[in-house]
Image: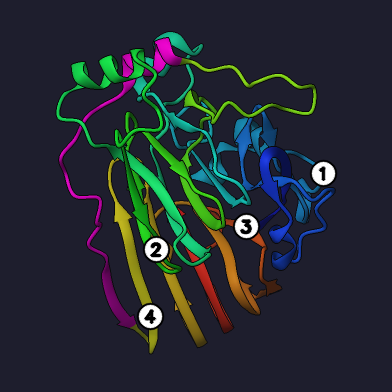
Amino acid sequence: MALFLKPIFHEKIWGGSRLRSFGYNIPSDNIGEVWGISAHPNGSCEILNGPYQGQTLDQVWNEHRELFGDFPSKDFPLMTKIVDAKKALSVHVHPDDAYAYENEAGQYGKSECWYIVDAEKDAEIIYGLNIDTKENAIDKLNEAQYESSMFNKVKVKPGEFYFIPAGTIHSIGAGILVYETMQSSDVTYRVYDYDRENEAGHTRPLSQSKAKDVIEVSNESINISTDTEIVENHKRIQLVSNDFFTMVKWEISGTLNYMKPREFVLVSVLKGQGQVIVDGEVYTLNKGQNFILTSEDLDTIFEGDYELIVSYL
């Protein structure tokens, strides 16, 4: 039995209203994030169907670990969300697992990846620093040279993909809609927030001391080589696979007999509609839906014309 999940909406100072295009009944016009699959304490999704209906994902994870192959982690390890950046996000960085465990009450660190769903012309992200060493980066931060060329800015287009490891300074720019898979973490250290104020007239706090601890300077290319193959006449694009997660985009047209690659997988519908048949039970699929195929789901068939993102460990 697939576990369908109720999304959770988060208002943000930089958020907008484009998440309505996914069929979501968002509560305001400044919704920055929808957490589609989450068991995090700051927002655990409610199960919408079956014997666990009304329970939250963290509750099911803790009480029915057999649904997830008895995975040994204390916390549900992954999260998916869609980000609507009407305005630019703060420039920020996330810690790795070791730093977060020591300094954030045992939480996961946060590596994440972005699939660009939509982007206005000339929209750009910040990805990393145009600086050669961490020492020089810290000097620049101390000098508050935020508007200089220290940030590496990259223009983006729909369909592109970026992996952001922990320690990488980054930001999603204005006019971009992003699907994210990430470690289940909500730890963010703001470096710069454009001196903007919230509704109460206060600037949002920065976390520069911790940011300086965790930032990494890398000369590695930001371009990720994706792997595309045709499976039963459907396109399968492996976007990334590393120690934290694997993220695959499926473009389905017709019928696909799907075999789970792990005990449980996270699935989000980005486009189109159809159905999924799980052990003979038929579920209608529409854009914006999110669900988990558990270890008990042995026979899965996707039918229709739609695009999915499938994420797993």
Quarter of the view holding residue 220: top left
Identify the secondary structure beneath mark 1: loop
Q: Nearer the viewer, mark 4 or mark 1?
A: 4
**Highlighted magenta segment, given as a residue range:** 208-230
Q: Is residue 211 magenta?
A: yes
Q: Which residue is mark 3?
A: 291
Identify which residue is drawn at 48% across, 26% down. Answer: 192
Which of the marked residues, 2 or 3, is nearer the chain's N terminus?
2
Which residue occupies 49% across, 15% down?
Answer: 207
From the top left corner, tell me how far across and down residue 176 is, in percent.
54, 57
The kind of residue tagged 4 is: Lys
The numbered mark at residue 69 is none
Q: Report the front residue among 278 and 223.
A: 223
Q: Tell me, yes or no, if residue 1 can be seen here.
A: no
Give the CA separation, mark 2 to mark 1: 29 Å
The amino acid type, in three-letter code, at marker 3 is Phe
C-alpha distance separating marks 4 and 1 = 35 Å
Q: Which residue is mark 2?
A: 248
| Label 2, label 4: how far apart the Cα atoms are | 10 Å
Residue 42 image offset from top left, x and y in percent: 67, 28
Q: Earlier in the sequence, mark 2 or mark 1?
A: 1
Whole-percent x and y of residue 132?
15, 29
Label 3: how many Cα within 10 Å (few below 14, some 14–19, many 20+): many
Left or right of 242 in this view: 8: right
Which kind of residue does numbered mark 1 sit on?
A: Gly
Give whichever of discs 4 and 1 has the lower sequence position: 1
The kind of residue on which mark 2 rests is Val
Packing grade of label 1 (10 A; few <14, some 14-19, many >=20) is some
* Mark before the other along the chain sequence, 4 or 3: 4
**Rendered view: 270 above or below 128:** below
